[in-house]
Amino acid sequence: MDDNLAALREQAAAAIDAASNVDALKDVYTSLFGQRGRLTHLLRAIGQRPAAERRERGAELNRIKEEIAQAITQRHTVLEAAAWDAEIAERIDVTLPPRPSPSGLIHPISRTIAEIEAIFGALGFSVAEGPEIEDDWRNFGALNIPEHHPARQDMDTFYLPGRRDGRRRVLRTHTSPGQIRTMTSRPPPYRVIVPGRTYRADHDATHSPMFHQVEGLAVDRAITLGHLKGCLIDFLRAFFDKPLLPVRFRASYFPFTEPSMEVDIGWNRQTGEIGAESDWLEILGSGMVHPRVLANCGVDPREWQGFAFGMGIERVTMLKHGITDLRPFFESDLRWLRHYGFSPLRPPILHEGLGG
Ligand code: PHE
């Protein structure tokens, strides 16, 4: 290698090392490989050499060229990583104390269930769950809904193919099978709520084929209609955070309760204000557990009696938070979820009130 080439090699290596950023490195590259670069010039000059030297000279130059190109690539990787680190360091101040920034939020339905559990928990109820795929005995028959009852129509109900223990399988149309499961699993007394998913063949702005209910069941030796009223009034006033919320009990009919009552709360139809005295809004179904339902579960109705209720969870969630359309509840639109979601760091705490 002649002195010229040895010097070029050394100088190039020094310049590459000295380049302190990507731009400086680019200048080094251009000074060597550019139109007027030193290496470009030397490669071009091979042609002017005597034919005998050309081959060797060419091979040597190419080796040096490869060597330098590799050094530039390596340096480029290092400089780029350093630039990236510097940029990140500028944006993230790692000395800042952590801020609570939860990566997820609690869905309003889950929040309402948690609030309901908090309130009924304070009233001495425990929480149970049942399967969403029920059999028609627990969903209908045991609840005193006979074969010909319209609630059983295939139109309203999602039946599944096949049978379990000889019974038709159905997506539960309400949480009331939770009553049956509770009463057939252990002896009374019972104080339990059963929140969960339910299904009906309905779909419009206020009905979704999948929705949520919460069932309540209280059975003891001397549970009366007074307990039912007291519990539900207390619950509704706590849930809506309105100590004077007007509550009305209206005679109704369910096959599994006798007597049965629909429960309404006072609100203003125009403004949606809850607690107003201008209009009534139906909010849940309730009644004294029908003696036949007790007997169907092996609970002696001469010894035990109690009340049950069932409430739609979407309905009360929409009312409480002024949500007017049911559909976005289940569309997973992040904008909606961020707007209506609840911080997981603030679970419902009764003594703080559940005003939300
Ligand atoms: N299961 C009834 C419904 O879905 C509600 C209800 C439950 C009524 C318990 C009375 C007692 O409409």
Image: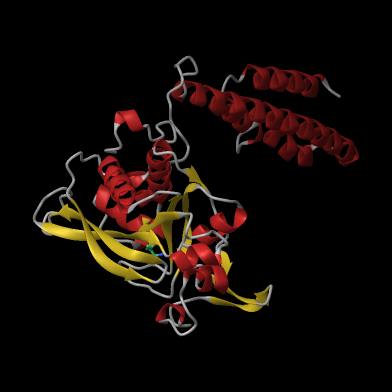
For residue 284, side relative to residue 184 (left or right): left
> How many numbered dots are placed on residues in this image?
0
Residue at (43, 81) in percent of width and height:
149
Query: Can the viewer see residue 215 in this picture?
Result: no
Tell me if residue 222 comes above or below residue 43 in the rendering: below
Q: Quadrant of the N terminus?
A: top right
Tell me if residue 81 comes above or below residue 311 in the rendering: above
Tell me if residue 213 comes above or below residue 124 in the rendering: below
For residue 303, side relative to residue 66 (left or right): left
Residue 306, picture quadrant: bottom left
Whole-percent x, y for residue 115 in the image? 38, 41
Whole-percent x, y for residue 236 in the image? 28, 46
Q: Quadrant of the C terminus?
A: top left
Pick out the residue farthest to the left. Answer: 278
For residue 205, side relative to residue 52 (left or right): left
Residue situated in front as seen by the camera: 120 or 339: 120
Residue at (65, 35) in percent of width and height:
33
Residue situated in front as seen by the camera: 217 or 130: 217
Residue 168, picture quadrant: bottom right
Residue at (46, 40) in percent of width and height:
104
Whole-percent x, y for residue 275 in the image? 16, 48
